[in-house]
Amino acid sequence: MERYYNHCTLIGDAKSKAEARRLPDGKTHIAFVLKVPKDIGKEKPYINYVRVSHYFRDAAAAKILADRIQKGTRVLVAGELHSRSFHKAGESESRMLVEVTAVTVNLLDEGRVTA
């Protein structure tokens, strides 16, 4: 039997404030987009945008984390990588969405928050 392992660790800056919402099963979900630059040091680095989802059983803990993730917050995310393509209404080209279902979300430098 073949075995596979899907795990990634990313460090980047939150593109915007994290959003928290309560799910019907009682869990709380937070989501945000992580900006992960590639080719740092070049005049115009390429930026990867990765959607991050994290699920909590404790709604209070989810709200605390969501409130602390603001635009520019440096975040370490570890979890399972997923990608999918989709068509936006009115467009003929497909788009690619990359997501991480996080098992770990660590704030690395809360002092870097920008407006």
Image: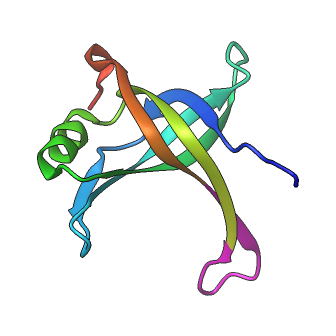
**Residue furthest bottom in the image:** 90
At x 81%, y 48%, the residue is 3
What residue is rendered at 59% in x and 85% in y?
Answer: 89
104, above or below 102, in the image: above
Residue closer to the observer: 6 or 106: 6
Q: Nearer the viewer, residue 36 or 82?
A: 82
Q: Along the line of sight, which residue is nearer the eye, 2 or 20?
A: 2
Location of residue 16 (image quadrant): top left
Disc tally is 0
Q: Is residue 111 above or below residue 100?
A: above
Q: Does the segment drawn in magenta span residue 95?
A: yes
Tell me what residue is drawn at x 11 percent, y 46 percent. 60
Q: Position of residue 19 (x, y in %)?
A: 27, 53
Residue 30 is one of the magenta-drawn residues: no
Residue at figure coordinates x 74%, y 73% from the top left? 94
Q: Which segment is the magenta one?
A: 86-98
Q: Above or below — where is 81 with respect to 94? A: above
For the C terminus, give its image quadrant: top left
Q: Is residue 60 left or right of residue 115?
A: left
Instruction: Looking at this view, name the residue that lies furthest to the left.
Output: 60
Residue 9 is situated, as x and y percent measured from the top left of the image, at 59, 30
Quadrant location, the N terminus? bottom right
Q: How is the image coloured?
A: rainbow
Task: Indicate the position of residue 97 as horizontal and vertical percent values.
Answer: 63, 60
Residue at the front extreme, as displayed: 1
Q: Is 90 above or below relative to 85?
A: below
Q: In the shown orientation, is residue 2 left or right of residue 52?
A: right
Q: Report the side of 2 relative to 94 (left or right).
A: right
Residue 49 in which image quadrant: top right
Task: Where is residue 5? Give x, y as percent.
Answer: 73, 43
